[in-house]
Amino acid sequence: MSSAAVTSVGCIGPARLTAGFDTYKRLDLWAQSEVYGDLNLLSYGELVELADQIRLRGRGGAGFPFARKLNAVAESARRRAEPTVVVVNATEGEPAAWKDKMLLNRAPHLVIDGAALAASALRAREIVFGVADDGVAGDSLLDALRERRHLPAPPRVVTVPHRFLSGEGGALVRGINGEAHIPPGTKVRASDFGVDGLPTLVSNAETYAQLAVAASIGADEYTSIGIPEEPGTVLLTITGSARQPSVIETPTGVPLKEVLRLCGATPGQGVLTGGYHGQWITPEAAGQAEISRRGLAEVGGSLGAGIIIPLAEDTCPLGEVSRVMHYLAAESAGQCGPCRLGMPEMARLVNAILDGTGSPDAVHAVAGATRGRGACSHPDGSSRFVLSALETFAEDVSAHLYHNGCGRPVKGVLPIPDSPEEGGTWRLEVDWSRCDGHGLCAHILPEMVRLDSNGFPAFPGAPVPSWLEPQARRAVDMCPALALRLVGGAAGAANRRSRPRGGRAR
């Protein structure tokens, strides 16, 4: 599946976030009132109590308790005698994620209501909505805001680049502040220094929608479904090999296989849980898993950002993983060693296994060296993704290392934007009739270029990350034999296919 829109929406059990979808294509303000009633604002104490009673945790991936976030922001504002800001993170930069886009397109007032509850309780100076520049949900949000004449704080919509790291909390705050849309180099809590340096509450769009539902139906009704420690429902994006890619609302505790069945999918070769910072699980584990943070963790998976991607039997799993690792390396902010060096190295090593020349031990070594050392969670999350893949697809790894591959094509089931087939990106290529193995390119561009056993350059066929383009151009300019080139799109892909494996052409 490509990164095309997921338009189907389904529900298991009573509809909460998707209530009214059977009647209305999109809930405008009037339809919102018909389905959920009028919004009744709560005091700070009442809102914290509600969040505690329903055990609300963030739905963006980290799962941080929402009541603790509220308390941290309120305490910081009290200590510093400053106003607060409420930020709705609806950027959803991960290619496989569609639940927040679905909410903004079909139930935008539910997200706005949740943000209004938080802004009123915290006496916020403003509400900032962060959306991606992909054109998917921004217009629906703006239309909904134009319908709202009275909000506890003035709203503002900020558009950020549709990239993997743009939705990271620190990156979003920096983007709102007019800085580069990348995570800060040091750990900074938004509750202490967020938008304009003020105490800021940053949470995911679904989190605010869940808060609005709870305020509408009450804590007792909200907790009447789901498992006791994680009550209520969750939104899941089901893509990959599913015949009907969908956003599904389901109570916690429902078997994963039931969700897959609803979307016309089976566990296939394995299931990615939690997205590209999540973990792969085996078909056997998927058959036992229940939808919840605890239920997925018990079988080695993760709920993360609510992304579930089954992988069918007709594609090469290691090839799919290699595509995503190159994408993740290219999406790096490039501001710390684990991202600048570790991420491209992991992508290269996975590609080497795919070619039958690598070693899983080498991938483990690089992942271990980067663990916990990044300026953000990108290296750790990407390591989880690739290490769980090597374990889940151990038989495929063996086939590539010892039996000349698995014999299956790479169908591009895992969605990534700007795939090589679509062109428009720069890639390195070598004129092997000129290359004399000087090795200078590997010194200038160590993030991408390595020297093989014969001393000739070897590099993955992935696009050059934007933050590495200046170094790549310098490597091209400095090549003594004029053998290294930068090419765009399909030309680079065609040339890579003609290159002999193992080094210089003979």
Image (tube, rainbow, N blue to C red):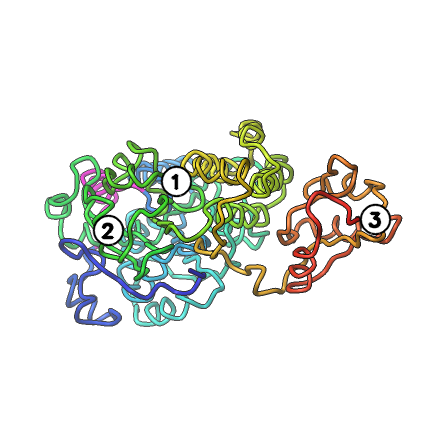
* Nearest the eye: 380 or 181: 380
Say which amino acid is labelled 3: Cys
Q: Is residue 388 above or below residue 167?
A: above
Say which amino acid is labelled 2: Val
Q: Where is residue 165 shown, x and y percent of the image?
A: 51, 49
Q: Name the residue under label 3.
A: 435
Mark linked to residue 259: 2
Q: Where is residue 353 shown, x and y percent of the image?
A: 57, 39
Could you tell me which secondary element the residue under label 2 belongs to?
helix
Q: How far apart are marks 2 and 3 (CA)?
A: 53 Å
**First of labels 1, 3 by sequence position:** 1
Q: In this view, does 473 lie above or below 150?
A: above
Could you tell me which secondary element the residue under label 3 belongs to?
loop
Q: Distance between the residues labelled 1 and 2?
A: 17 Å
* Nearest the eye: 477 or 229: 477
Q: Does the image show residue 80?
A: no
- Rate crowding at label 3 as few (under 14), some (14 to 19) or many (20 or more) other CA atoms within 10 Å: some
Q: Are marks 2 and 3 in contact (CB under 8 Å)?
A: no
Residue 26 occupies quadrant: bottom left
* Quadrant holding the N terminus: bottom left
* Nearest the eye: 448 or 179: 448
Say which amino acid is labelled 1: Trp
Q: Give the range drawn in magenta.
A: 41-57
Mark linked to residue 280: 1
Could you tell me which secondary element the residue under label 1 belongs to?
strand
